[in-house]
Amino acid sequence: MTQAVPRAGDGPLVLFADGRQKTFDLVVGADGAWSRVRPAVSPVTPHYTGVTTVETSLDDVDDSYPELGRPIGDGSVSVYGVNRSLSAQRNSGGHVKVCAPLDWNAGLDLADVEATRSSRSLLARWQRI
């Protein structure tokens, strides 16, 4: 799909890269920030809000990181503080996604991949409870 075009009455017209066109009753746009479907329902375009989120994954969380797996339980957990947050969501097979805003004032050199990966400065303002 290259574009979804809004049309009154007949539903959106979907244009495909090979030149085909087809009208649908419903088009679901689950294609991210620069969605090709969004213009069919809204003229709003994405813009950077100034917040960058870092996502990481933990595999085999229950065996490798049981102290982290317990508060996540079978779903998700989010914690919030002043100008900070941390969210973790359990997926299948003991896999957990963790998201936190990146603090650009933490002195990270993102060009130094290994230092960034091992940096605790992403969570420096959190304290252990």
Image (cartoon, rainbow, N blue to C red):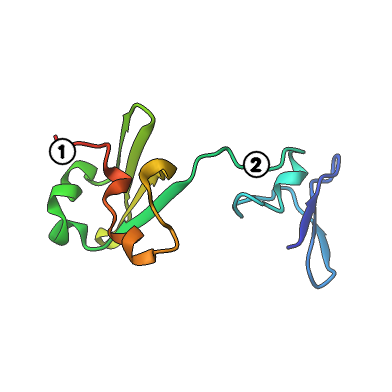
Q: Is residue 101 left or right of residue 17?
A: left
| Residue 51 placement (x, y as % from top left) | 50, 40
| Residue 104 placement (x, y as % from top left) | 44, 44
Query: Residue 80 sits in which quadrant?
Result: top left
Give the residue number, with chain letter if any, for mark 2: 47
Q: Residue at x 24, y 37 (%)?
A: 126
Q: Which residue is at the front of the view, 128 or 19?
A: 128
| Residue 1 placement (x, y as % from top left) | 73, 63
| Residue 101 placement (x, y as % from top left) | 41, 42
Count residues near mark 2 (Cα–Cα under 10 Å), then give few for <14, some for 14-19, many for 20+: few
Q: Is residue 11 left or right of residue 101?
A: right
Q: Residue at x 78, y 65 (%)?
A: 16
State the residue lying farthest toward the bottom.
18
Give the residue number, with chain letter if any, for mark 1: 128
Q: Where 124 sits versus 115, above or below? A: above
Residue 75 — which label?
none
Name the secondary structure under disc 2. loop
* Mark 1 → mark 2, Cα distance in angstroms: 35 Å
Query: Residue 105 sits in which quadrant?
Result: top left
Q: Which residue is at the front of the view, 25 or 52?
A: 52
Q: Residue at x 35, y 36 (%)?
A: 85
Q: Residue at x 41, y 45 (%)?
A: 102
Count residues near mark 1 (Cα–Cα under 10 Å), then give few for <14, some for 14-19, many for 20+: few
